[in-house]
Structures are given as structure tokens and as C-alpha cells.
């Protein structure tokens, strides 16, 4: 079967120095871009993270400091990665919680503006967990009857994710072959940022999901406690979260001026 696409979708996977969105870095990125006409583009690059790769992480994905010492940094690759994905929706395995937030951080550090305003994200892991509760390797075996021999190789994981999604659509009648539907089905909560620090309430207002102001709207907090905004910008929050907060504050100021 083929995916019913209104625009391209880029399935991607990252191998990294760890799992901290704000402090860890990409060491390998693989993108499989599927066009509405079925055409495929494949892009895989090793990346010099500019920080050491912990030994325990190397044991997982097999990439060591020496493997990436002579590779380009993400700053050097950011524009070509952005040009590949800028017209596309995104797809991945646990991508909503990890890969997309980390990619956004790397893009913003490289001074490349990146957001999800005009795209949706399909998280194949969420679909899988809602249906079967398994890992990617088990999903590949279950849906495609294939063994994922190169697990934690970004390129192998990316290809497997794409094949699993197609098999999921064929298997479950309740899944529509539509990117927007799949994105909504595979989302956990409605986040204003990627990391989940700012969520939408039932009225569609941005609210804090943590700390002393949990459940309060961002606008309410910024109005009553202006200093909290400065603290957030200076604290160790993801760059994209800070970008969203700044946009909310600017929107409020523009509304007052108008």
C-alpha cells in the first residue's frame, strides 16, 4: 500500500549523546522523505556533536568519539537538513517526545528557525503502543514479519518505522490513510511546545504544566508575575519552549497596543 499524502512526509531518526533535550547532541541523523507521488529521498549523516559521547551510549548505538571526530557539526548541516524537511510533515518512532524536540533544539542553536505551525507529526510508537504495547523491533516483527537486525542504526530504524506505519494502516480499519488523522491519533497531549512544559487547556489557552503555576494560563502568570518570564528565559529550559513563551508575551503586548 502507499500512504495517502497531501504533502511530503519525512520519517527521521536521531542517534545522540544521550536523552537530555537541552544538553545532548545529535551524532547521526537519517531522513527518509516520501513524496505524494511515492518518490523517496534518503539522507543519512554522521555528526560531530562537539561534546564527548558517553561509553554507555556508544554501547547502545555503536558510534564513538573517533567515528565522528572528522564529521561536520550540526551547525554545518542545519541548513541542508532544514531544506529537506521544510515542506514536509514529520514521522518517527517516539519522535513527538524525543526526536522532534531535540531536532528543534539543534536547529535553533544553529540559528535556523524551526517550528511545527504548518506541519503535523505522526508518532508511530504511539500508534503501536495504543494497539500492541511493544518496541520498534517487536513492531517490525509483528507487522512486517522481519527482524530488525541493525536496531539503533538510524537508517535501519528509519526504514523500519516507515514500513511499520504502512503495515499499521493496512492492519487496523480504524486508522485512516491520512497524515492529519495519524498525527492526531499518535499525539498524547496538546503541547504548545515540544517538551510539554506548556500545554493547551480545554479552551485552547496555553498553560504551564509544571511548578508552582501548574494549570494556570501563561498570560495570567506573565501579567501577575512579570519576573517569572525572565526567570524562565534564564533557566535551563529548551530553546523552543523559550521561543513559544516569547511569542505568547509578544502576542499579549500587541493585543494591548491594539
Image (spheres, rainbow, N blue to C red):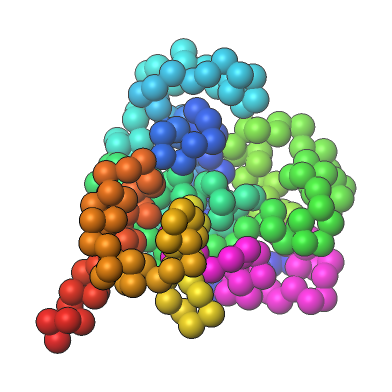
The image quadrant where one finds the N terminus is: bottom right
Q: What residue is drawn where x is 48% and y is 71%?
A: 200
Q: What x and y, as percent, mark residue 19?
A: 54, 36
First to last magenta residue range = 165-194
Seen in the image, is 116 located left or right of residue 224? right
Q: What residue is drawn where x is 50% and y is 28%?
A: 17
Q: What x and y, as percent, mark residue 236?
A: 36, 41
Q: What x and y, as percent, mark residue 106?
A: 37, 42
Q: What residue is drawn where x is 24% and y is 74%?
A: 251
Q: What residue is drawn where x is 12% and y is 82%?
A: 257
The image quadrant where one finds the C terminus is: bottom left
Q: Is residue 88 above or below residue 58?
A: below
Q: What x and y, as percent, mark residue 240?
A: 36, 53
Seen in the image, is 74 located left or right of residue 258? right
Asked whether residue 44 appears in the rendered view, the answer is no
The image quadrant of residue 132 is bottom right
Q: Is residue 52 above or below residue 145?
A: above
Amino acid at each position: 500500500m502507499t500512504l495517502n499524502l497531501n504533502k511530503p512526509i519525512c520519517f527521521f531518526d536521531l542517534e545522540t549523546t544521550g536523552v537530555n533535550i537541552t544538553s545532548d547532541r545529535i551524532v547521526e541523523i537519517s531522513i527518509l522523505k516520501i513524496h505524494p507521488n511515492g518518490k523517496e529521498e534518503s539522507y543519512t549523516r554522521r555528526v560531530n556533536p562537539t561534546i564527548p559521547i558517553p561509553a554507555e551510549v556508544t554501547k547502545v548505538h555503536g558510534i564513538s568519539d573517533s567515528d565522528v571526530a572528522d564529521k561536520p557539526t550540526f551547525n554545518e548541516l542545519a541548513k541542508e537538513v532544514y531544506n529537506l524537511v521544510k515542506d514536509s510533515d514529520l514521522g518517527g518512532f517516539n519522535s513527538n517526545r524525543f526526536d522532534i524536540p531535540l531536532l528543534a533544539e539543534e536547529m535553533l542553536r544553529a540559528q535556523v528557525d524551526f517550528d511545527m505551525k504548518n506541519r503535523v507529526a505522526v508518532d508511530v510508537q504511539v500508534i503501536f503502543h495504543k494497539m500492541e504495547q511493544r518496541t520498534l523491533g517487536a513492531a517490525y516483527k509483528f507487522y512486517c514479519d522481519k527482524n530488525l537486525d541493525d536496531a539503533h542504526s538510524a537508517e535501519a530504524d528509519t526504514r523500519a518505522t516507515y514500513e511499520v506505519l504502512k503495515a499499521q494502516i493496512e492492519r487496523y480499519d480504524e486508522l485512516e490513510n491520512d497524515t492529519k488523522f495519524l498525527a492526531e491519533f499518535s499525539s498524547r497531549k496538546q503541547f504548545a511546545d515540544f517538551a510539554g512544559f506548556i500545554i493547551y487547556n480545554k479552551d485552547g489557552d496555553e498553560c504551564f504544566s509544571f511548578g508552582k503555576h501548574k494549570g494556570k494560563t501563561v498570560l495570567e502568570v506573565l501579567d501577575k508575575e512579570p519576573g517569572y518570564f525572565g526567570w524562565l528565559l534564564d533557566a535551563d529550559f529548551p530553546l523552543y519552549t523559550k521561543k513559544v513563551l516569547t511569542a505568547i508575551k509578544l502576542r499579549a503586548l500587541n493585543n494591548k497596543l491594539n
